[in-house]
Amino acid sequence: SGSSGINAEYGRNHGLFWLFVAGSLVLGIGGSTPGIAGPTYMDEMYTQKEFGIAISLLYIITFVGFPISVLFAAASLNIYVTLDPPEGMSKERPEWVGAWWLGFLVPAVVIFFVSFIVMLFPTQMPAAKRVLEDKIRKGITTVAEKEKRTFHRSLAEITRDTIPVAKRILKNKSLNCLVFGDALVFLQIGSISYLPKMYAIAFRLGFSEVGTVIGVSNVIAFVLGLVLGGAIMRIKDWHPKKLLLIYAVAVLVSTPFQASLFYRCESNVVGGVDIKYFNSTSSVPSLYDTCNEDCKCNTAFPSFVCDESDGTTYFSQCHAGCLGGELNDPTNPKSGIKQYTDCMCTAGKTVVPGECGSRCQTRLYISLALSVFGTMINFSGYAAHATVYQRVVGEVDRTVAQGWRQFVTRVLGTLPAPFFSGT
């Protein structure tokens, strides 16, 4: 009966896994469409000078969504997954599970209503004809390209043109150099998914607190950089080669500032890692010793605690061998842990939640300032970069080129990036 119960539980979890996969697939299809069709739609209604500002505003809305999502996730994770935590459960405990599902539910409701507004947009804005004539006059496109443009095509016509369009895209050397270069950039910035954890460890921040810190700093950097990039585009009608140079310079100048995270707090002495536990019987430091051998401690999620008697940090209260604890408010079981007691692996026998040592706020502010400046310079080239994508292909191939870019950068950049960064 035990075996059948385990199999039944596995079957339920297995079904939920594929439900998540299906949901992620639909989310990816819907989330990719604005990034594919949006720039091309805007390029048709704005001149090149205007396009820089317009695409910057689009990117601001898009990229600001990331730090806002971090802030929303931080707020959601401060709420227990069932909305009503059990007695004795607090955010400091490794068993705490935040209300992660709010990150799906709330945006889904908002997107549902906004989508109806987007559906009212026409195939072309009234300014599209004027903009196309301006492009022909400046040599950005040709009359032949204009005549190729058709709307309201049948499914059979779209299917028939698929192979010729694919050949043009794959043979376009300039486009593919840009696309595979972007894939390398996305591969390099894969550490973003680990950024909250890196900041939490480097500057001794709580995981909910670090979401606020990164979210606010990234909003500032994104907005300033994209506004600067739009202003540069506004100066004149840049040649695509010069636009590409602007983007390359922005990336090169911003690269050294990515090392700002190395200006971190000084490392703590961690019991079981840097030094042996108090009264340890082991010949070398180890997270598992006789003082905590019956505790079955988990190393997947750190929950640092501090022995203030000697300034030693421990991976968790479990690794410190603690048998008891005291609440902040003894009359309120949900008030959180004040300190853990009867800790067999420590010298003081009592530990408090959090790492030992100061928060080194000055280093945190300096690191954030350098990071914001570097990110601002990096994003100042994004408007130029987006314009180049609209110029290296024909008018009729722009949307397909954006789709090809999204596919390659995600398959070769976004997807493998966490594996490289996490090793």
Image (spheres, rainbow, N blue to C red):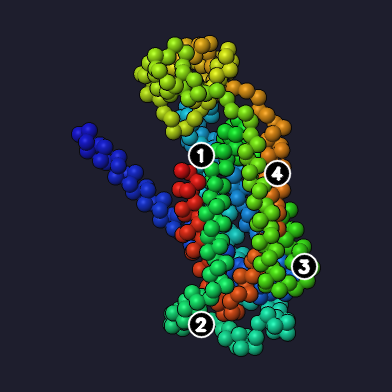
Instruction: State which tag comes first along the sequence, 2 or 1.
Output: 1
Judged left or right of residue 365, residue 176 is: left
Q: Residue furthest front?
A: 283
Report if residue 333 is visible in the image: yes
Does the residue at mark 3 contact the one at mark 2 (Cβ under 8 Å)? no
Q: Distance between the residues labelled 4 and 2?
A: 51 Å
Q: Which of marks 3 and 1 is in front?
A: 3
**Crowding at label 3, few (<14), some or many (≥20) Cα neighbours within 10 Å?**
some
Q: For the residue labelled by badge 3, is the local secondary structure a helix, a strand or a loop?
A: helix
Residue 262, x across and y down, in percent: 62, 38
Residue 130 in sight in this render: no
Q: Callout 2 environment at 10 Å: few (<14), some (14 to 19), or many (20+)? A: few
Q: Nearer the viewer, mark 3 or mark 2?
A: 3
The Cα atoms of the two marked residues, 4 and 3, are separated by 27 Å
Residue for badge 1: 99
In the drawing, what numbered circle is on residue 370? Answer: 4
Which mark is first along the chain, 2 or 4? 2
